Structure formats: structure tokens, C-alpha cells
Image (spheres, helix red, strand yellow):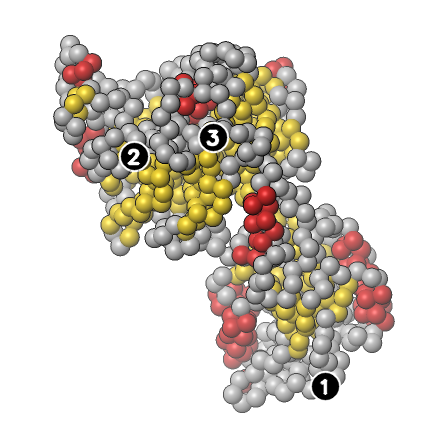
Amino acid sequence: MIRALAILLLTYTGLVAKEAPLDIITYNIRQDTTGDKGPRDWQQRKDRVGAYLLDKNASIIGLQEVRHNQLLDLDQALPDHGYTGVGRDDGKTRGEYSPILFNRKLWKLDPGEHGTFWLSDTPDIANSRSWGNRYTRICTWARLIGISGPERGSAIYIYNTHWDHQSQPSRVKSGELILKTIVARTHQEDPFIFMGDLNATMENPAVKALLASGLLIDHGKSQFRSSSLWKAPLVPGLRIDHIFTSISIKKAIARVESNANSANESASDHHPVRLSISARPPAAQPIAAEPMVFGEGGQIKMLYDRRQRPQAVYLNDKVHIVFNAGGEKGADPKSRTKAMAVTYDPATRSFSEIVTIGKASRDHHYGPVIWADEDDYLHVLSACHKTPGTHLISKEPGTIGSSLEDWKVGPEIVPKISYPCLFNIYDDKELIYYRTDGHTSSWTYRISDDNGKTWTGPDNDVTDMDINGRRDWSSYQTKLLSKDGKFLHVAFMTYDDVKTDDPEKTEAERFYNPRYDKTVSNEWKYNLYHIKINVRTHEVTNTDGDVMQTPMDIDYADSNCRIWDTAWRGAGVPPTIVLDEKGAPAFLHVLSSEATEEDLDYYYVRRVEGKWEQTRITDSTHQWNSCHLSLDAAGKLHAYLVVGDGYLKTDGYMDKHGGGRIEEWISSNKGKTWKKARDLTPGRTDYPGWRFNNIQPVRRPGGEIVDGMLLFYGWGDRNAPEARAFLLDERLR
């Protein structure tokens, strides 16, 4: 067990460390109506409402009587907040909203757990009314998942409503319906907040029934009237605007507050009510960060480099993984393995039976890749080094089945493919980016708009480092799709050891490198390049936006798209790419520090005011270490690194391409400085002396990263194919 990590997770959920209060506001802002003149006109009030909410910096806000134009005004006034909710008249934009606003740096909306229902006998029908209410009434609800700060790793349900102002039966029935909805929520362990303008005081039978249910707590410590009557001063009395919590929230205070101008005029005919939670409720029990094995019997080709990592797609609440494994215990490290598939269910933290989907092969390059098309059918491509490979399509959507019989052979994509990388791009199309043959071949891509039946691509390949006929010139490349699916960022390094066109030259002559004035290993790659491909037009540009001529050879790339001349400093694997909030690329790169393979570092490479800067993070154990870099919603960078006490230099064949411990390093200032956050190395009791590599995230079909999940390989015997495939799932149950 990783005890230190478990403690850290508890700290993140607010169970150990004392954190700032969690502030929640409910506020009836008064609808925008032509009947309100002068200081009561929305145009006169909107800045005061926005300024109050901005000043209070509430994590979660529930508003009532909000017209669509008012929602847009407040959305602009609160740039850090997102919202969910619809207009009550049509379920879209007409009529009043009861929206929920949330700080996007702290929370994300659970995509399957939010909506609006109508307070009527037909809650799913927009604009429906029952129980004698004159106006349509609604309740907006959402499950918010904490992504940073003390809320990270937790989740909370929010229910925001506006009850009828005349019909008592409607208020009673509305309370009953909302309580029923709360009881039926999917994640019973999550705490909840129930708030809104109830048009009912604490003495009203409808409110008394809520509290008598035993599900809710009122944290009001001062009794002031929340109906302001457009006046600023707080007047003793009973509230009609409330924030109630689940009984799991023990330490909290709810207060009526004033929001007025210098003339002592309120910004609404209601006062806001603010709830400060001083102690977070016990969250769902954190899962100890123990890695789960889903594949055994791997050999060297599991570990070759970042182009051969385990692949996964998160689809319909399941994780479908493909990998190489199945070697015999104690066999030669280059023994044959097979392409396999398995499904992980996060709800039960269990794996399906493994399905063998590919033939055995000794080649390092045959690692399978997986993707899902727009109809949720799974596709797997394997055994495709300098061959078309085998393209399989699941016979049923969203499942790997139980055997190879549950798959059908798909169309050939192109005659030769190496190192394929698949993306779901704009308009539900698929893109495959690949090397066209061996080391001296080009890189290009193909696009399908019919779920993989046919593929087309640009007239010219993207790069061809051997275009002038020079032997052994090539590049290693990584790719990342833009959020809108319309641009592909490509980073690459080059072999530039070969300084002759003469095929009759000896290998020693061909691998002479003038940087060292000696013959060097063919595993070293140099420099760092970046290009951006418009996958709609096939236009290729460099970082400055200049249009590139394709295919690019080494000389053209050096002149037009090189962002870091590494001189004599080399690496084994291409960098990891991350895109910032503006879509600009940055990179995590392994690179030698001296003219030796035994001194390497991790660098964060970013562009600052038009110039590329490199910031050292920490030591690397090997030039082939394959790591992961991500950016969270709060703008914090997370680097998952393979580290150790020194350079990994052994005689073991399994160690040939790196390995070590796994650490998470974090930067909170856009990569200027970095700090070690935690050690993610699997438990030393279960895996003493093991090495790990090939870290990558789990992604959704569109490329979005699934928070809290990492895939990687690990091995204990440096000379035997006994490597295992691991999944780390740090999410709550």
C-alpha cells in the first residue's frame, strides 16, 4: 500500500489539513423587466450583482429569476465560473432560469449527472405546471467533481430551485419531489446542497417537512428577512431564501447579507444568502493508489519507446485497453507475445477476461492501438510495422467481446504503416498519423469520414528526412490534437548522424557525428521541431504561422521549424506535448546534459514572448524514458516522470529502453519552477526492485484525458519477459 499517497489524498479531500471555507451563495437577482425603472433597472443593477458575486469569490452559486440576457451578463462578469441550467418556458433559453454557477478552477460538471426538472406531475416536460401554481417552476441540479485545491477528489450534488409564491400545495409538492430526487441520486455517498427562493419561511409546513425528513440541516445562525424590499439594511425576520445541506455537513454557517449601492439601495428585491462550510464532509472513501495488473508475460517490445505504450479508450463508463503480453515465464526477453484486449469497469474496479486479438510476433513495433468511431464501435490496429497490419472492428458497439470471433476484419488503411496514432477529429472523422515504412521513410496521415471504411490524405507527406537520398536520416515524432479537433500538433527529433550520401560507406563512416568527432550510437536523436497541421485544409505551418512546404527534409526543417538546437545533446524518445489554455504547445523532453548517455534531464520547453525557453525539472534515469505531461483546469502542470538514483545502466535486456520509479512533479507558475508532489511508484512490498516506464493517460474518444487514471508497464527481471501492464485508478468510488 502506498501509505504516503493515501495520506495525501485525504489531505486533498479536506479530511486532514485545515482549509479555507467552502462558500456557497443563493441569490434571487430579480428578473430583468420593463416595469423596473431607475436604479431598479437591470442595466443599473447588473454591475452591482456581478461585483458582489466576484468579490465574495463563492465556489458555487445558485441564482433565481434569471433571464437569458442576465445570465450572459453574469457569465461575462464571472470569467472563472461556468454554469448549467435552462429557461423554464422551453427547456432552452426562454423564461426564467435557476442556474448553478461553479468555479471552473475548482470544479467540473459531471457530464452524466446534471439537468433541470419541472415542479409538476410531469417533471420531464418543459413548461409543465401542476398543483395550482400560476407560473412554471423548476429545479436545476448538478453533480460537481472537485479538480483542485481542497475539493480535489470529492464530489457534491447541488439542487437550486424557485418555488411558487402563491400556491401552498405547490410548495408542499415541490418539496416532496425534490426530496425524492435527492434520495434517488446516483452517488449516495456524496453530500448535497439544497438552496433557492422557496417563498416560504422556516415556519411554513413545506419547509418544516423538508427538515423533518432527517435528510437536511439548516445552518442559519442569524435570522434576518431575506426579502429586501429594495432596501439595503438587514431587518430582523424570517428568511424565504434558504441554503440547506445534507446531514454529513456539520460545520457551516448561513448568513443573510446586503448588497447595495452608495445610496443604500439594494441590487435586488432579495438579499443574498451565503453559506460558509468550515469543515468538509467525509467524502467517499478514497481508493488507495495501488496499481492493478491487467496483463502479464510482457517482453522487450512492451517497453520499446513511447510509440509502443499501452493504449486505452474510455467509452460509456468503461475503459477498453489493448497491449502486448503473454510471453512464457523465464523465456528470452525477445520471445513472442500477442496483441490482447481487456475492459476495465471503474464502478467495480475489475477487469474482464482478456481477449487475444493478434498473432504472435517477435518485432518490437507491433504494439496495438485502439479507438472508437462515431457509432461507438471499437477499432484495433496491430502488427503493422512496414505492413498494413490487421485492422479489427468490434461486431457490437462498446465491447471487446469474449473472443476473436466477436471481431471482424476491417478495411486496409494503407499498404505500409509504422507507429500508428489514432485521433477522433472534427465532424466525427478519424485520423491516423503514421510512418510510411522503415527508418528512412516519411511521416504522413490519412482521414476517414465513414468510420474507417475509406481513407484519404494530403497530396504530399508531412516530413521525409531521407528525401535527398541520404541513408539513415529520419525522425521520431509525437502528436497531439487540438481541443476542437481541427489541428494536429507534431513534435519531432531527427537522426542527423549520417553525413554522407554514399551507400558504399561503412557503418562506422555512416554513423560519424562531427559534433563528437566520432562514431556514435544510432539511438541518439537531436534537436526539437514543432509544426501544426490544419487537418481540414492539409496546410502545415511552423510555430510562427508560416506555411511550410511539404514534404520537409532535414535541411528545410532546420531552417524553418526547429525550436531547439540541442547541438551535441541527444535523446531516445520524442517529447510529450501539452496545450495551454490558449491552445499553444509546450513540451516535456528528455535530453542529455553532457556528451554522455549517463547524464540526462527532463526539460519543460515553452514559448515566452516569442522565444523558446527550456526549464530543467529533474534527473532522468535513461534517454528512453517515456513520460506524461498534463494541464489541469486550474492551470497547474503535472509531469509524471520516470526517475531514479542514477542512470540506469545494466546488462539486462529488459532495461535496454529505460525505467525507474514514477514521480509526479507540479508547476503552479506556467512551468517556471517545478516541485516534486508525490511518489507514485507501485508498492515496494508487492514489487520490490521493479522498474516502470511508458506512462500515459486514459483518454476519451475525442482525446480528452480521464482524470485520475494512468497506464504503464513494469518489470522485475531484467533478463526475462515477465513484465506486467498496470492501471492506476485514483478516483473515488
- The total of numbered circles placed on residues is 3
| Comparing labels 1 and 2, the label whose residue is closer to the camera | 2
Q: Is residue 545 left or right of residue 413?
A: left
The Cα atoms of the two marked residues, 1 and 2, are separated by: 72 Å
| Residue at the spot 58% in from the left edge and 86% down from the top edge | 265
The Cα atoms of the two marked residues, 1 and 3, are separated by: 65 Å
Label 3 residue SS:
strand
Query: The N terminus lies in which quarter of the figure?
Result: top right
Identify residue for label 2: 599
**Marks 1,3: beta carbons within 8 A:** no
| Nearest the eye: 657 or 49 | 657
Query: The C terminus lies in which quarter of the figure?
Result: top right
Identify residue for label 3: 692
| Nearest the eye: 288 or 86 | 288
For the residue marked with disc 3, what is the amino acid? Phe
For the residue marked with disc 2, what is the amino acid? Asp
Identify residue for label 1: 236
**Residue 564 position by quadrant:** top left
Q: Measured along the vertical axis of the image, is residue 197 above or below residue 267?
A: above
Q: Measured along the vertical axis of the image, is residue 258 above or below residue 666?
A: below
**Marks 1,2: beta carbons within 8 A:** no
**Residue 729 position by quadrant:** top right
